[in-house]
Amino acid sequence: MKKYFNILRKCPLFDGINDNDLAALLSCLGARVNAFDKKYTIFSEGSPARYVGILLSGSAQIIKTDYYGNRSIVSAISTSELIGEEYSCAGAESIPVSIVANEPSEIMLIDCGRILHSCSNNCLFHQQMIFNLMRNLAVKNIMLHKKIDVTSKRSTREKLMTYLMMEAERQGSSRFSIPFDRQELADYLEVERSGLSAEISKLRDMGVIKSNKKQFELL
Amino acid sequence: MKKYFNILRKCPLFDGINDNDLAALLSCLGARVNAFDKKYTIFSEGSPARYVGILLSGSAQIIKTDYYGNRSIVSAISTSELIGEEYSCAGAESIPVSIVANEPSEIMLIDCGRILHSCSNNCLFHQQMIFNLMRNLAVKNIMLHKKIDVTSKRSTREKLMTYLMMEAERQGSSRFSIPFDRQELADYLEVERSGLSAEISKLRDMGVIKSNKKQFELL
DNA sequence: CTCCTTTTGTTGAAAATTCAACAGAAATTC
DNA sequence: GAATTTCTGTTGAATTTTCAACAAAAGGAG
């Protein structure tokens, strides 16, 4: 497990827990690591909401497909982020989204019950982890609000610009790359791919943005 | 404070805490009650994210206004629900939404720091409240996902039907009333009011729904 | 390197949404 | 209870998005 410590240290679940304790804690929690190839489903819609995941390497996307088959991308996940904790922490029966590896990825899985309920060793970390989960869920809540800010815009252009400005701010630079290809960006913004491409071209012609594939710059 | 106990008992923040303890706890937390008239702003966008609110009576809406002045309704709040905890728990500087009373309402305000940090009395309720906040935030997360399910639909009709089916399920009946008038429902679904009215009429003519103002029935 | 697949940008037609304006119904005020 | 304001439904025109189809570009496989 040692080789994952650089990632795990950054995981919000383990805030305030040092490396020595972490090793013991992980075995106490029964953490295990699974690997997934590109495009493989890590959690599939409808599966039991028992585990909390931590993305150790690669990247993933949270995807929702409605009964007409329309794909919607809820968010992109990068390393050291928690996955699925909203469902297991809420005590949900099953998860209503799929989580798909975007490239070869490794996930650490932990049974959520082992986090929330004290162990026989009576260790003190459960309180800390519950606090960490609380804070992480609050932050995720805010991120969902931001996602709603983007998709609540009425036009393709406004959705795109709101998203790009948000990413520029998040990444701290007017030049940045996004984790989506065109179709994925369309599925994230909830618009047509062709209309999105056309809008990007227009904004480029107008001199508002520069863009090359996944690279963008706000001018 | 006694008169609010029926509401407070149902508030997720106080799960697992009995009435005797609650009285002491509230004074320990420095809880106070404010009243607001219809249309008055309880929290305004940009104000410090210090307090957790509990709606004691009346009803409220979480509202976001963008720089063009377009109003978007994020959600409706009913009694015993927590307000603004995602921002204070995440340690946000200020809140990015407004919360507006929809009718004369009373709110209990609690400084979030007093919930999260142990008091000099060393009482045991902080752990319980942190756990409760964690669970409540997880549940809210799921509700935001559901809101995204609604607004990610591409057409007015699909948004409306997804919302109505969700409400029917939530209220456990195919007959139910919604907490929005037409303009508010449009602002919640992120569509045009006139187009929404037209769609409701069409669905009524098609025999898919019955509706009268805020009362709906799925057929 | 060549072939094959995937991704991206473009375009025009069809469909849907937004906008603006109005009239009737309902609710509120005085 | 009369007058005023707010809410709702309707309609047609303008705008935008979606859909479908294609070609060029890029990426991957063998």
Image: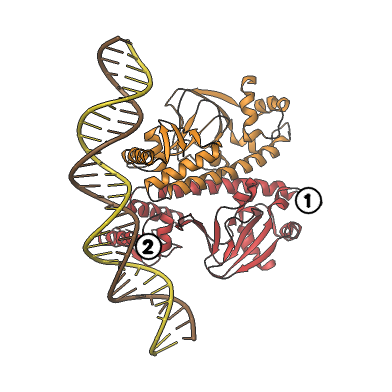
Chain colours: A orange, B red, C brown, D yellow
Chain of the residue that carries numbered disc 1 in the rendered image: B
* Callouts 2 and 1 in the same chain: yes
Q: In this view, does A194 lie to the left or right of A61?
A: left
Q: How many labels does the image show?
A: 2
Q: In which quarter of the image is residue B180?
A: bottom left
Chain of the residue that carries numbered disc 2 in the rendered image: B
Q: In this view, does A186 lie to the left or right of B59?
A: left
Looking at the picture, tell me which residue is in the foreground, A173 or A38.
A173
Q: Is residue A141 above or below residue B23?
A: above
Labels 2, 1: front one: 1
Looking at the picture, tell me which residue is in the foreground, D23 or A131.
D23
Q: What element carries label 2?
A: strand
User: What residue did someone put label 1 on?
Assistant: B119
Question: In what quadrant of the picture does the N terminus of chain A appear?
Answer: top right
Residue A72 visible:
no
Q: Position of residue B133 (x, y in %)?
A: 63, 48
Q: In this view, does A157 lie to the left or right of B84?
A: left
Mark 2 residue crowding within 10 angstroms, few (<14) / some (14–19) / many (20+): some
Residue at 55% over, 39% down: A170
Q: Where is residue B190 in the image (x, y as percent from the top left)?
A: 40, 54
Q: Quadrant of residue B160?
A: bottom left
Amino acid carrying mark 1 in the image: Cys
Residue found at the far right of this picture = B120
Cα–Cα gap, marks 2 and 1: 48 Å
User: What residue did someone put label 2 on?
Assistant: B216
